[in-house]
Image (tube, rainbow, N blue to C red):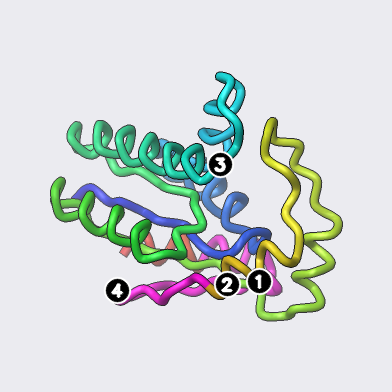
Amino acid sequence: MKKLIIVCGLPVTGKSSLAEDLAKKLRLPLLSVDPIESAIIKAGFSRSFETGLSAYLVAESVAAENLKLDSSVIIDAVSGVPEAKNMWRDLSKKYEAKLIIIECICSNGTTHKARIKARVRSIHGIPEVKWADVLKRKSEAVAWDEPTLVIDSINDRAENYFKALKYVSD
């Protein structure tokens, strides 16, 4: 059965690294919202709510094309708000794909803040995340209704990877 694998969570919780590791191992397409938004900005659009929404819509459209071809796909996106969650739910239903959700967290606030301060991604047009950005997104986030594997990035990366790999393979 084809799968729509959502790797989500607040910024700097390890979701992109985990999504990349899974995509490599499973040989699945990975659609990451931040690089898509960066490409939209490179095209000459100023960063805004609309460029972020557009990035989600591009990821949704490309995921739909893959699912239509019976290929599973991995999405790397915060997906904290109801509209994003509903986008993935609807896509899963439309293409009869199993929805698999992995939510990355960092349970230690001090560690999370330190990682945010130290991280440099240098993605064109996307500023580095600040702690205030994380707190804002956290205040807007809603829980998933579906079964969700929670991965805590304070745990060993290899341990988290194997846990996630087992979850998506079941």
Instruction: Measure the alpha-carbon separation of dots 2 and 1.
Output: 5 Å
Queried whether the magenta region covers residue 153, the answer comes back as yes
Near mark 4 (Cα within 10 A), the count class, few <14, some 14-19 or many ≥20, is few
Q: Quadrant of residue 114?
A: bottom right
Q: In the image shown, does 166 or 155 lie closer to the viewer?
A: 155
**Residue placed under numbered mark 3 in the picture:** 48
Q: In the image shown, does 71 or 145 lie closer to the viewer?
A: 145
The segment highlighted magenta reads 140-162
Q: Give the percent coordinates (x, y) of residue 117.
A: 84, 59
Near mark 3 (Cα within 10 A), the count class, few <14, some 14-19 or many ≥20, is few
Q: Which of marks 1 and 3 is in front?
A: 3
Mark 1 or mark 3: whose residue is earlier in sequence: 3
**Residue placed under numbered mark 2 in the picture:** 138
Q: In which quarter of the image is residue 5?
A: bottom left
Queried whether the magenta region covers residue 21, the answer comes back as no
SS state under label 3:
loop
Query: In the rendered image of this protein, does residue 74 appear above or below residue 113?
Result: above
Instruction: Measure the alpha-carbon separation of dots 1 and 3.
Output: 19 Å
Mark 3 or mark 2: whose residue is earlier in sequence: 3
Mark 4 or mark 3: whose residue is earlier in sequence: 3
Q: Give the percent coordinates (x, y) of residue 87.
A: 29, 53
Q: Nearer the viewer, mark 3 or mark 2?
A: 3
Q: Say how many tags the image has.
A: 4
**Residue placed under numbered mark 1 in the picture:** 135
